[in-house]
Amino acid sequence: MDSFLPVQVSWTPQTAASGSDFYPYTNNAGTVAGISGGDFCVMAADTRQSFGVGYLINTRYQPKMFKLSNGSVLGTSGFYADGLTLIKRINQRLEWYKHAHDKEMSTPALAQLLSITLYSKRFFPYYARVLLGGLDLEGHGVVYGYDSIGSYEPCLARATGSGGSLIQPFLDNQIYRKTPLGILQAPHTLDQVKAVMRDSFTSATERDIQTGDYLELFIITAQGVDVEKYDLRKD
Amino acid sequence: MDRFSGNFDRFSDLFNPYDSNPTNANHAIGDFTKCTRKPLVMGSTVLGLEYQDGVMIAADTLGSWGQLARYRNESRIYPVGNFTVLGAAGDMSDFQHTKHMLDSLMIKEYYTNDDHVLSTPHIYEYLSRVLYHRRSKLDPLWNTYVVGGYNNGERFLGYVDLLGTTYQSSIVATGLGAYFAQPILRNAVEGREGILTEAEAIEILNTCMKILFYRECKTLNRIQRAKVTADGVEISEPYALPTEWSFGEGIRGFGTQTQ
């Protein structure tokens, strides 16, 4: 996975207080993933928030994935304050759009809006790994993956954040079926995708110390968004 | 006149990264645009927890000036409105600025006279946006805040730091308290918020503050506690925690002892 930080400086409040310069970022980490299906989309994020430097857990439950007013789901990891600010800005733009056009913004339009919002801070980026999930204009599931400065692409399955590099190859195999060694080629059902997602996160939690505690699944269908919560390892 | 051994060598006047004395040359005294990046009088740990009647927070009363225990009666807990309390670690002058800012906000809201008052989540949101805004200007308020409150039967305990990072939890600890006290608080409080009595909450906080006093150098055993319940905010007078040092007699292997 891409690692975007404008400057590489090790920073903690402790070192900062002893005379070093202020560094405006930290990495509260966490993992976000999304899988799209024929008429659904499953987005997932763990709920641990880490301090960023050292082995501290701030809290075991601070959601970083949110349902937006147009029925899409936006997940962030990385610097929590930036991610939250980004979501506040996006929510406000969605409200303005609704008042201006008397309809909800489509997910593909929101994907483009998210891209330019990230790029508008190209030289002081939101250090957030963002994933947007929803249904496209035909009602097919879609996941958009981003880097911190707004490059984006629609994809079948995508994982990002601290455990992203552990989950992505598993999704490449299970969802993209890049190496079809006798694997069935039938389209995935919602239950299969949910199972893949839960296995992905329980596995990532085994190795990534910044992922864990709880898993939140956002299941997006034409009927709306369902949220399911599962336990993950808490160590 | 410089009494700090790190500066006996005249070359180290230029820059000494290990020097924590705020008056020395590597600190930006006189350069006003940089002053806010160099905290001077610092407060240490703040602890907070939820219990059955509301929330309780604790902090010692020390304002450290470098390694010097400069101000020993510095209150780091402050009420905002009737049902919110603010605990501050970090730079004390930035904390005073924040107190002034929140007082102005509460007065402005009072003048509207519309029977609406800002509850704890509102104050917390306001504060966290101010801190995030200041970090985005690269001119941070050098603090970590614990915001506690009790509104309409709901407990609230939140954390916000100089980067604008926020989280809400039933236990909060800043600074070294996050290492020493957080695990103790998690064991004692998590899952028991609704049944923890006031006496138990006081006991837990006293124990944690005492452990911090034993191990962290920039603390005092003189602490203040605040609780927010349905009856409002109540901040205690500073009181001393009893400490026990006699076990030091029996420790061998360093200092002047040979055996």
Image (cartoon, coloured by chain):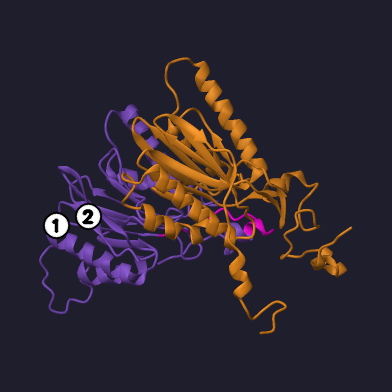
A149 falls in the magenta region: no
Does the segment drawn in magenta span residue A28?
yes
Residue A59 seen in the figure:
no
Label 2 Cα crowd, 10 Å radius (few <14 / some 14-19 / many 20+): many
Task: Determine which residue is flagged by label 1.
Answer: A190
| Region in magenta | A16-29
Assign a secondary structure to mark 2.
Answer: strand
The chain whose colour is purple is: A
Which quarter of the picture shows residue B33? top right
Q: Residue at x 48, y 32 (%)?
A: B233
Q: Give B197 or A126, whichever is nearer the viewer.
A: B197
Quadrant for the N terminus of chain B in the image = bottom right
Q: Amino acid at mark 2?
A: Val
**Residue type at the position of mark 1:** Leu
Q: Residue at x 28, y 55 (%)?
A: A143
Whether residue A226 can be seen here: yes
